[in-house]
Amino acid sequence: MAKGLIDLLLDNIFDAEWIGRRGEKLTDRELILVRLFGRSGRVLRNIYVPKDNGETSEIDVLFITQKGIFVIESKNYSGWIFGDEKAAYWTAMLPNKAKNRFYNPIKQNKSHIKWLEKYLDDDIPLFSIVTFSERCELKKINVESPDISIIKRDKLYAAVRLTWGNAEDKLDKPKISEIYDKLEVLTHVDQAVKAAHIDKIKTKYMKAEIQTNTKQIEPAEPTGETLICPHCGGKLILRVAKKGANAGNSFYGCANFPTCRYVRNIDGEFEKNKE
């Protein structure tokens, strides 16, 4: 299961946030195929739905149709994917056996649906779909709930078609336009709102990981303080450079390497591509 040239280029040139956005665009592109085959609807990306506490819940992609709203969580990981519906975290294992843990996307999308439902305050069917990159393999995924789809992105058409065939028409064109207009304004948030959302997500998921898996958390500092990667929210681990001009020197590297290559020097200065 060797990485392809595209994967290597993505890992080395772009950060995790850019790769994630690219995945959302590709998911949006797959919905074009869905619409071409008669299952029409309107698409929105990066919707910041308000929560009761003043924070936001960011939904990757929405597909608003006559059947209801498909709430799509897009993941752009490569490698083997292992996960369980009830687990707090899932794992992506790379060809070199490195393991990257990420928050359970089913739980993540369940939270999105909760706040979307509250914001719309209407009886609208909401369908949960989690899409993964074609670059990965869904090796072992345990899902019991029949209303949740975990698929690779190129199977999005089939997943929508299956739900479409089993669901009744609930929304007419005027209602679809009304919902679209109400949600479209939530895609135009300023950078301060986006930054606050990212900070909250990093803090929330890092605390959850410490509470649920404390045995695997290694303190990044001798004091026990855990440093957080500002790119992807992973923890920073003390490492030693094995090659290059800095061979033998210590630095803090992101635990999600090589998916995320963010590093921090001991003196506190940050770089992107330290060897």
Image (spheres, grey):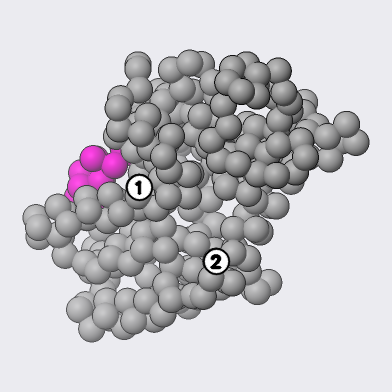
Whole-Å distance between the Cαs marked 2 and 1? 18 Å
Q: Specify start and end residues of the magenta stretch as a single range.
A: 151-163
Residue for point 56% across, 26% down: 275
Work out whether 92 lies above or below 147. Answer: above
Seen in the image, is 127 located left or right of residue 207? left
Give the residue displayed 51% in from the left and 16% down from the top: 97
- Identify the residue under disc 1: 23
Whole-percent x and y of residue 80? 42, 24
Residue 100 appears anywhere in the view: no
The residue that appears at 42% across and 50% down in the rendered structure is 18
| Disc sitting over residue 66 in the figure | none
Q: Is residue 201 left or right of residue 10?
A: right
Q: Residues within 10 Å of mark 2 (few under 14, many from 20)?
A: few
Examine the image and state in which quarter residue 249 appears. top right
Task: Kindly state the secondary structure of the residue where label 1 is placed.
Answer: helix
Kind of residue indicated by mark 2: Lys
What amino acid does circle 1 point to? Gly
As drawn, 207 above or below 81: below
User: Label 1 crowding class (10 Å Cα cut-off): few <14, some 14-19, many 20+?
Assistant: many
Residue 147, percent from left and from top = 39, 48
User: What is the count of numbered marks?
Assistant: 2
> What residue occupies the far left of the structure in this picture?
37
In the image, taking residue 61 as reference, residue 217 lies left or right, namely: right
Q: Residue at x 38, y 37 (%)?
A: 10
Quarter the N terminus occupies: top left
Residue on which disc 2 sits: 194
Q: Main secondary structure of the magenta part?
A: helix
Q: Is residue 80 above or below residue 145?
A: above
Is residue 157 inside the magenta stretch?
Answer: yes
Earlier sequence position, callout 2 versus callout 1: 1
Q: Secondary structure at mark 2?
A: helix
Observer-nearest of 264 and 191: 264
